[in-house]
Image (spheres, rainbow, N blue to C red):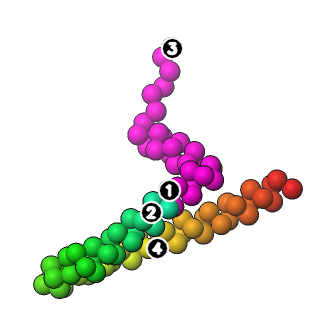
């Protein structure tokens, strides 16, 4: 009998679970997310500001995406805080 090959969804879930349960990996991912957010903000403010100013839909889509990325980073930080509390409580 051949072993079952995991689907992409199952492999992605396993990778996410492994990343979220390791504190150092989680913190590295969170740091990269913050750097990406800062880069996107800087690009929108100084790099392509004229291009964004030309059309309203570009402006809304760009800054809406930045807002969603910022919400993701905040949610990631809250998850990390809750995970650290849980880890420390389990250690006692």
What is the quadrant of residue 51 in the picture? bottom left
Whether residues under marks 2 and 1 lie with C-beta atoms below 8 angstroms apart, the answer is: yes
Mark 3 element type:
loop
**Between marks 4 and 1 in the image, the one whose residue lies nearer the viewer:** 1
How far, Cα to Cα, is label 2 from label 3? 42 Å
Which type of secondary structure does the marked residue at label 4 adopt? helix
Residue 4 relative to residue 64: left or right: right
For the point 54% across and 69% down, the residue is: 75
Q: Residues within 10 Å of mark 3 (few under 14, many from 20)?
A: few
Question: Reading the chain from its start, which is encountered first: label 2 or label 4?
Answer: 2
CA distance separating discs 3 and 4: 46 Å
- Residue to which mark 3 is pinned: 1
Residue that badge 2 annotates: 33
Please tell me whether the stretch drawn in magenta is mainly helix, strand or loop: helix
Q: Can you say whether 49 is above or below 17 in the image?
A: below
Front position among marks 1 and 3? 1
Report the disc number at residue 86. none
Q: Which mark is residue 29?
A: 1
Residue 70 at x, y percent in the picture: 44, 73
Report the span colored magenta: 1-30
Q: CA distance from mark 2 to mark 1?
A: 6 Å
Numbered tag placed on residue 71 in the rendering: 4
Q: Earlier in the sequence, mark 1 or mark 3?
A: 3
Spot occupied by residue 46 in the image (x, y as percentages of width and height): 25, 79
């Amino acid at each position: 009998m051949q072993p079952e090959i995991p689907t992409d969804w199952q492999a992605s879930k396993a990778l996410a679970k492994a990343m979220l349960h390791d504190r150092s990996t989680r913190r590295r991912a969170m740091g990269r997310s913050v750097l990406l957010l800062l880069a996107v903000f800087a690009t929108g403010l100084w790099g392509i500001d004229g291009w964004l100013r030309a059309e309203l839909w570009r402006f809304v889509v760009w800054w809406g995406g930045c807002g969603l990325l910022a919400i993701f980073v905040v949610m990631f930080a809250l998850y990390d805080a809750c995970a650290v509390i849980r880890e420390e409580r389990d250690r006692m």
